[in-house]
Image (spheres, rainbow, N blue to C red):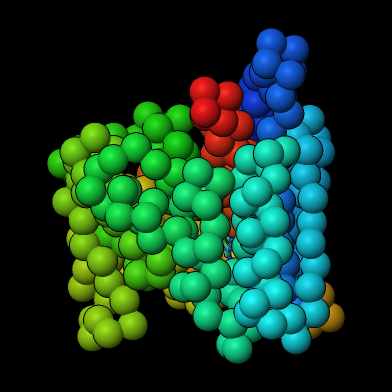
Amino acid sequence: MIIDGKKVASEIKEQLAIATKKLNSENNIIPGLACILVGNNPASEYYVRSKVKSCQEIGFYSMLDKFKTTISENELLAHIEKYNNNPSVHGILVQLPLPSHINEEKILQAVNPEKDVDGFNPINVGKLVSGQKTFIPCTALGVLELLKYYKISTSGKHVVVVGRSNIVGKPVANLLSQKKYGNAIVTIVHSGTEDISKFTKEADILVVAIGKPKFINAAMVKNGVVVIDVGINKIINGSESLLVGDVDFENVKEIASAITPVPGGVGPMTIAMLLSNTFQAAQISISK
Ligand code: GUN
């Protein structure tokens, strides 16, 4: 089975568009997202444009601040503060990675936790890890939602997460190990793992987020595995460039019971979850 993230994301967006109309007519509020992009990394530009476009499609208010790579940390902090104090902005997203002269931790810490729709502020990371309600990082939430939509149970299953990034690997592994989200047995493998395939072969569910094109091949997984491929890598094939995941889709799909394609798998879900988190931030702001 191919897991169709594009379809699931589009259903979620339709529901959000309806809920947004209702929220506006009943409470006179339009969910607002501010996106901040620093530099001209083509992938980041593409992601941020997709995020802003999706906001427009479902009736959100959105804005995009694009800054030169040379922006100073203090200037960037001042822009974040401006959005922290703007009541029309319910969500703030700082696209990562940031240039090396800017301290990423300091920037993420500056985002008001109530507007931190990416769930990257350490206050929200702490809440997530300790099982409290908070914004869940969009890609991790997208992975959980896809599994739920396709009724793929994780309870008691062995989930192997390949990659330990703050954005994907850590939150996915943490959530899936928690009783209320996944109740799974979770193994994390990473660049320090000597024999990765020893672990991936044991996985009932494999979540791959390491940013290496076609890293997981058919010999590294067992029959019937569920594969969630978070990678989006651009590769050059002759004269054309194409997007591939971290999994060798064509070969692994023959032995997997379910697998996400790239593109059209996790990617669209990340955006749908960002919209969902922004909608929630707007809703929460009503009662404040
Ligand atoms: N860079 C790669 N993924 C993400 C994401 O989900 N959010 C942000 N802000 N930056 C990213």
* Viewer-closest of 35 and 52: 35
Report x, y in % for residue 268: 63, 46
Is residue 44 shown above or below 153?
Answer: below
Is residue 255 shown above or below 29?
Answer: below
Residue sitting at x 53%, y 80%: 103
Residue sitting at x 56%, y 46%: 115
Report x, y in % for residue 55: 75, 40
Residue sitting at x 69%, y 82%: 72
* Viewer-closest of 155 and 1: 155
Report x, y in % for residue 238: 78, 82
* Left or right: 252 as drawn, with respect to 267: left
* Viewer-closest of 122 and 198: 122
* Left or right: 7 as drawn, with respect to 51: left
**Residue most extreme to the top:** 26
**Residue 131 at least partly seen:** yes
* Left or right: 91 as drawn, with respect to 240: left
> Residue 87 appears in which quarter of the rendering?
top right
Report x, y in % for residue 106: 49, 73
* Left or right: 263 as drawn, with respect to 69: left
The image shows a total of numbered marks equal to 0
**Residue 227 at least partly seen:** no
> Residue 44 appears in which quarter of the rendering?
bottom right
Residue sitting at x 77%, y 44%: 62
Instruction: Report ligand 1 position as a quadrant.
Output: bottom right
> Residue 14 appears in which quarter of the rendering?
top right
